[in-house]
Amino acid sequence: MKRVFRLAGIAIALATGVFFILYAKRAIHGHDLSALLQANVIGALITLVLLYVCLIPITALAWTWLLRGLGQRIAYLSTLAILAVTQFGKYMPGNVAQHIGRLAMARRTMPMTPVVLSMTYETLLTIVACAHVATLTLLWAPHSVLSRLPLGDHRQALLVTVTLGALIALSILPRLASKITHRRLGALHPCTASNELVNTFHPGWKRAASCYAMYVLNFLLIGIGLWWLSRVLAPVESAHTNPVFFAGAFAASWVLGFLAPGAPAGLGVREALLTIILGTYFAPASAVILIVSLRIATTLGDLLNFCFGFVLNLRLRKSVSPHPSG
């Protein structure tokens, strides 16, 4: 069954990728793209890259909090080094190499159980934060078609409902996380779950809420970067948008790409959804340029983080290696 889902995910990624390529080809045909080489455009793209680079340090901070809440004494630099190096694995087919690499590196210094449990919490909290940001954005600034529906007159009530839904989801995470962790550990090593003990299955509400806020911040940073780039590329079209709109668009595309099995880094799936969302405000050519710029920025950002993580790992290993006695 897993193989069927993986093949289906690859097929969806290929189909959406082909759709985006054909759409992009039609959208930019006959357009002068020399403006992309202007200094202000390059500066805005660099800003987007730097904002994306910040996601790994922020996520590493949240992971450190989760691990400490589960009884692990781990340094922030250690989690940062692991995340920075392994994140680039998401570009490999299957979209799971980053998780496998992360587990392998973390096992050198920590038991398997809290590592898997912390990653489970991270995944669930990120999905909740992602869905929350995306839904709030679509309700706050709905598409013209959505605004004509009866629900469009009750946006404030819907915002409250979505917020309460996010809080309820956070309240059931401990039970859900413990079940998923036991399943994962059983698949990885049947004896692990019984041999390794975690101090608690809950990192604490304060830590969980803080991590949730960090994941929301990640999406807001991308929203700010995309909004600034849109202001430079298409100032007239972007006049009716704001950073929150772009944060929601990125969040919606992220969760769809995450749920698509087998799609490397959500390739194709995220671009297709962004085409639809950004197309509500931007001309096809502008939307395509923004989407391609985002993919370039995220890839460069992951590459920069990988290089930084590689160097940091070497320095950390040197600092803990025994010095020869003279």
Image (spheres, rainbow, N blue to C red):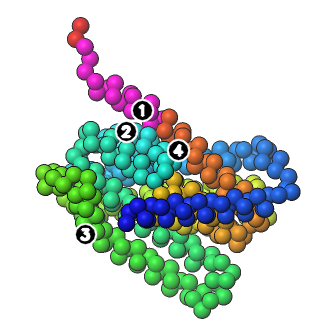
Label 1 packing within 10 angstroms: few (<14), some (14-19), many (20+): some
Quadrant containing the C terminus is top left
Instruction: Name the residue tied to disc 4.
Output: 302
Q: Identify the disc placed on residue 312.
A: 1
Mark 3 vs 1: CB contact within 8 A: no
The answer to the question of whether label 4 and label 3 lie on touching residues, with beta carbons closer than 8 A, is no
Circle 1 SS class: helix
Q: Amino acid at mark 3?
A: Arg
Where does the magenta region start and end? 308-324
Q: Does the magenta run of residues contain 315?
A: yes
Number of labels in the image equals 4
Q: Secondary structure at mark 4?
A: helix
Instruction: Name the residue beneath numbered marker 2.
Output: 77
Residue type marked 4:
Asp
Q: Which residue is mark 3?
A: 175
Instruction: Mark 4 vs mark 1: give the one in front.
Output: 4
Q: Is residue 266 magenta?
A: no
Res. 237 visible in picture: no
List x then y, in percent, for residue 284.
Answer: 76, 65
Residue type indicated by callout 2 = Leu
The answer to whether the residues at label 1 and label 2 have Cβ atoms under 8 Å apart is yes
